[in-house]
């Protein structure tokens, strides 16, 4: 295996952290991760983190909305952002010569956004349309409804987009209050993968980020989520039967996280030879799409198996899914199977690391959550350390029929 590159770290006095890897590509990938997401909302603020992500580009004390959007796109780069349950990320790709421009813009929108009333009112219509568009995609909507049912009563349950009612009632004052109290320097990580000398990058970030005073967040994640098993069928008049079967999984700091990642990848990862792909698609032709996902949060996690099925195959497909989960719990992997699973996951990690945008986001999130980044060698060692017994014990503990949840759209 080719030695992993060196990651370099810096932290400014105001708490903002920097993570960097130097490449020899003409393209620079940069972004800022903020440890705030939809689980930090409650009641009338549901959806406000996602709304703020949109609104950051709507004007600052230095620029109008058009000039914000043109700052990176105008030199051939790409500017974007996303919100998850626990993070917000603003990111860009550009030629290396325009990296300074990207960093300056990140600082401008994060510290000088004005959230003008007229722009927010227009953006409400955009988000309302996004909600409608999302509802027209059952293969995406089913994940959020699954989480709503599984974490009912907890902030992790609600949709990242919010509801039409909450979005319509957002005011500029509410947006500013939420933003000022939560998007603080102690929750920010600047992530860069680019061809630039480390001292120069530190100077650029010092110029754009270090002068802002230390601010700490009012966000509170002390309420513990509790997974609630269920079985629900929803009539949606879809051509396909959409099925989602899942359970609770290890949280992001769990010592079982690597083993569970390996097990999920073996079951339904992106490779065409996954166990679920072979069982449902290749052997029985029940579906075109079947995949598993492991989503760890800071204090819990979720494991899903999704399948878009031929109508009428729901029961047969669910039985096959449960059979594969049960097999992992009752039959340990052979040495050959375990070696093959490890080789596959390590290869996928290496390919992902070779893609600049993926790496920038990955190391930014790692610095945000763990305050460090594992090299590929370190990650590979963690994978190699997983035993067949560890996978089997995890499957026994988590893949219990009474602890599973299932949601069907038909």
Image (tube, rainbow, N blue to C red):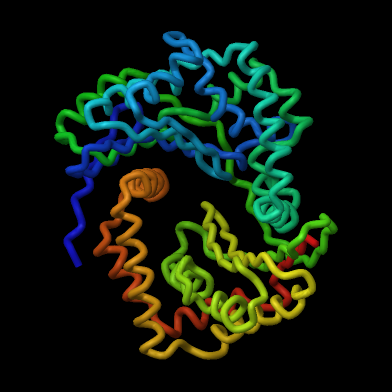
Q: Quadrant of residue 245?
A: bottom right
- Residue 66: percent from left, percent from top: 48, 15
Q: Vertically, is 14 above or below 273?
A: above
Q: Quadrant of residue 20?
A: top left
Q: Vertically, is 209 above or below 279?
A: above
Towards the viewer: 242 or 212: 242
- Residue 131: percent from left, percent from top: 70, 37
The quarter of the picture where the N terminus appears is: bottom left
Identify the residue at horizontal 52%, vertical 57% (top origin): 296
Identify the residue at horizontal 32%, vertical 50% (top origin): 355
Q: Vertically, is 211 above or below 80?
A: above
Q: How many marks?
A: 0
- The answer to whether residue 340 is left or right of residue 227 is left
- The answer to whether residue 301 is left or right of residue 140 is left
The quarter of the picture where the C terminus appears is: bottom right
- The answer to whether residue 14 is left or right of residue 280 is left
Identify the residue at horizontal 73%, vertical 45% (top origin): 135
- Residue 34: percent from left, percent from top: 46, 36
Q: Quadrant of residue 227?
A: bottom right
Towards the viewer: 137 or 50: 137
Observer able to see residue 210 = yes
- The answer to whether residue 79 is left or right of residue 303 is left
Observer able to see residue 151 = no
Identify the residue at horizontal 63%, vertical 52% (top origin): 224
- Residue 375: percent from left, percent from top: 26, 57
């Amino acid at each position: 295996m080719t030695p992993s590159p060196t990651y370099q770290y810096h932290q400014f006095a105001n708490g903002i952290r920097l993570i960097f890897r130097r490449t020899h590509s003409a393209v620079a990938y940069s972004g800022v991760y903020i440890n705030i997401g939809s689980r930090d909302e409650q009641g009338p603020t549901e959806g406000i983190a996602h709304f703020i992500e949109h609104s950051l580009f709507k004007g600052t004390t230095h620029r109008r909305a058009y000039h914000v959007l043109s700052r990176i796109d105008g030199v051939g780069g790409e500017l974007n952002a996303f919100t998850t349950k626990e993070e917000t990320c603003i990111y860009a790709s550009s030629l290396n010569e325009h990296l300074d421009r990207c960093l300056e813009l990140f600082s401008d929108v994060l510290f000088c956004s004005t959230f003008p009333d007229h722009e927010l009112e227009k953006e409400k219509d955009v988000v309302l349309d996004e909600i409608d568009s999302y509802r027209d995609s059952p293969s995406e909507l089913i994940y959020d409804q699954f989480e709503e049912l599984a974490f009912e009563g907890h902030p992790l349950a609600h949709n990242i987009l919010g509801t039409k009612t909450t979005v319509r009632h957002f005011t500029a004052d509410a947006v500013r209050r939420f933003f000022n109290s939560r998007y603080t320097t102690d929750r920010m990580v600047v992530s860069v993968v680019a061809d630039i000398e480390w001292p120069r990058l530190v100077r650029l970030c010092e110029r754009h980020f270090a002068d802002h005073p230390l601010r700490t967040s009012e966000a509170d994640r002390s309420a513990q989520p509790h997974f609630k098993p269920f079985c629900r069928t929803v009539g949606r008049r879809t051509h396909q039967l959409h099925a989602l079967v899942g359970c609770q999984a290890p949280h992001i700091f769990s010592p079982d996280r690597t083993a569970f990642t390996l097990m999920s990848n073996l079951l339904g990862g992106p490779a065409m030879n996954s166990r679920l792909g072979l069982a449902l698609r290749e052997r029985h032709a029940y579906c075109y799409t079947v995949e598993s996902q492991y989503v760890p949060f800071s204090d819990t996690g979720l494991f899903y198996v999704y399948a878009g099925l031929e109508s009428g195959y729901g029961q047969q497909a669910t039985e096959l899914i449960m059979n594969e989960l049960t097999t992992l719990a009752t039959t340990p992997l052979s040495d050959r199977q375990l070696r093959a699973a490890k080789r596959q996951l390590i290869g996928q990690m290496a390919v992902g690391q070779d893609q600049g945008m993926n790496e920038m986001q990955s190391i930014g999130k790692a610095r945000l959550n763990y305050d460090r980044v594992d090299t590929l060698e370190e990650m590979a060692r963690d994978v190699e350390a997983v035993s067949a017994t560890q996978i089997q014990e995890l499957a026994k503990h988590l893949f219990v029929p009474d602890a599973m949840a299932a949601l069907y759209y038909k």
